[in-house]
Amino acid sequence: PAPRLPLRAFGMLDFLVVAARGARLVGEPGHPVQELLDAQLDKAVEAVMQRCSQLTIDDDRTWQRARRAVYHAMNVAQVMPRNRRAHRIRRRLGRIADAMAGTGSVIDSPTPNDISHMTPMAAYEAGRETERRIVVQRRLRAGFADDWPQLRSNRRKVVTACSTRPRAP
């Protein structure tokens, strides 16, 4: 019989398999990874600025894309833990994400099946609660959209920090 591996060896093998199958950084072999990550961060921050500038109150899809862009940029910045610039960008993007909290497109409401089992008064109250949540969401979205020019000018430092950093020759 073949010798048995300890359980922690299987964890390491799983890690290696996931790493081998995971996404790879694509670029020229002569460029350091830091430059590739910086370029990805620049692109992600620009996407945040663009997506947040295109928001309208009623379009759930644009809000979803903007939130996704913010979280993607924060994740790219998190990959570079010892980079001060990336840390500042992640912190500023976190403020944008906090400002977008509550603007989500998913509102918990009862399904038609749930409503069919309710009394008329309970169904009416459930509908009113859903309406109140929609009103709150619209107010939060309107507030973010109104505040975005100011947020953008305050956060413009993020874009400036990305575009003014020294490039390798």
Image: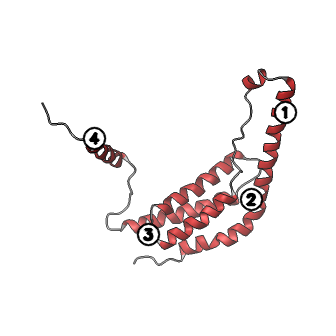
Camera-nearest residue between 20 and 125: 125
Going from N to C along the chain, the mark reached first, 4 or 3, is: 4
Going from N to C along the chain, the mark reached first, 4 or 2, is: 4
Left or right for 146, reference 35: right
Amino acid found under the numbered disc labelled 1: Glu
Which percent across, then down, holds residue 82? 44, 69
Q: Which residue is mark 2?
A: 144
Left or right for 167, reference 116: left
Q: Counting other residues with Cα less than 10 Å from the Cα at mark 3, is it few (<14), some (14-19), or many (20 or more)? A: few
Q: Counting other residues with Cα less than 10 Å from the Cα at mark 2, is it few (<14), some (14-19), or many (20 or more)? A: many
CA separation in Å, label 2 and label 3: 31 Å
Tell which residue pokes out farthest to the top in this image: 117
CA separation in Å, label 1 and label 4: 54 Å
Q: Nearer the viewer, mark 4 or mark 2?
A: 4
Q: Nearer the viewer, mark 1 or mark 4?
A: 4
Q: Are marks 4 and 3 in contact (CB under 8 Å)?
A: no
Q: Secondary structure at mark 3?
A: loop
Q: Secondary structure at mark 1?
A: helix
Q: Which residue is mark 1?
A: 125
Q: Which residue is mark 4?
A: 7
Residue depicted at 27% across the width and 40% down the height: 7
Q: Are marks 1 and 4 in contact (CB under 8 Å)?
A: no
Q: Nearer the viewer, mark 4 or mark 3?
A: 4
The quadrant of the image that shows the C terminus is: bottom left
Q: Secondary structure at mark 4?
A: helix
Q: Which residue is mark 3?
A: 82
Going from N to C along the chain, the mark reached first, 3 or 1, is: 3
In this rendering, is residue 123 above or below 159?
A: above
Going from N to C along the chain, the mark reached first, 2 or 3, is: 3
